[in-house]
Image (cartoon, rainbow, N blue to C red):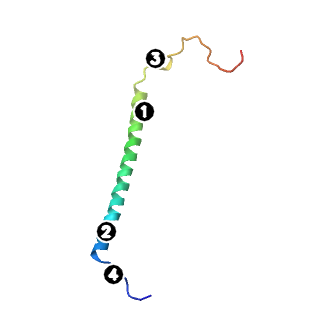
């Protein structure tokens, strides 16, 4: 082993820098995609909840069918 520090050639340094930059931009893109999917889901669920009318809460109140299954009656 020599005590001299290893020197990188400009080509190796540029290749390493380019690889790190590609990995960095890819991870930023994945984070943006995950955040946009989550925000889209939240906005959609809130929009669907706000569009309810008071009649939606009692939509099946007048139906006469057995709501319990497996009771053995």
Find residue 71 and report its image quarter.
top right
Which residue is depicted at the point 41% across and 27% down?
50
Q: Earlier in the sequence, mark 2 or mark 4?
A: 4
Percent position of residue 49, x then y: 43, 28
Percent x, y for residue 41?
41, 37
- Name above or below for residue 64 compared with residue 68: above
- Hey, which quadrant is residue 72 in on the image? top right
Residue bearing the label numbered 2 = 15
Residue 40 located left or right of residue 73: left
In the rendered image, residue 56, in percent from the top left (x then y), is placed at 46, 19
**With respect to residue 34, does 48 lie above or below?**
above
Q: Please state the total of marks drawn on the protein image.
A: 4
N-term mark: 1 or 3: 1
Q: Which residue is identified by label 4?
A: 7
The residue at the point 37 percent across, 46 percent down is: 33
Nearer to us in this view, 66 or 9: 9
- The CA distance from mark 4 to mark 3 is 75 Å
Q: Residue at image x 34%, y 69%? A: 16
Residue 57 position within the rendered picture, expressed as x and y whole percent measured from the top left: 49, 20
Residue highlighted by disc 3: 55
- 3D distance between C-alphas at marks 1 and 3: 19 Å
- Residue to which mark 1 is pinned: 45
Badge 4, how many Cα within 10 Å: few under 14, some, many 20+? few
> Along the polypeptide, which appears first: circle 4 or circle 3?
4
Residue contact at pointers 2 and 3, CB within 8 angstroms: no
Q: Which of marks 2 and 3 is nearer the N terminus?
A: 2
């Amino acid at each position: 082993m020599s005590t001299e520090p290893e020197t990188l050639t400009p080509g190796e340094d540029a290749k390493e820098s380019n690889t790190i930059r590609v990995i960095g931009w890819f991870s930023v893109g994945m984070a943006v995609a995950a955040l946009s999917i989550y925000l889209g889901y939240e906005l959609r669920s809130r929009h669907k909840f706000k569009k309810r009318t008071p009649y939606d809460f009692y939509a099946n109140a007048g139906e006469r069918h057995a709501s319990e299954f497996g009771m053995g009656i």
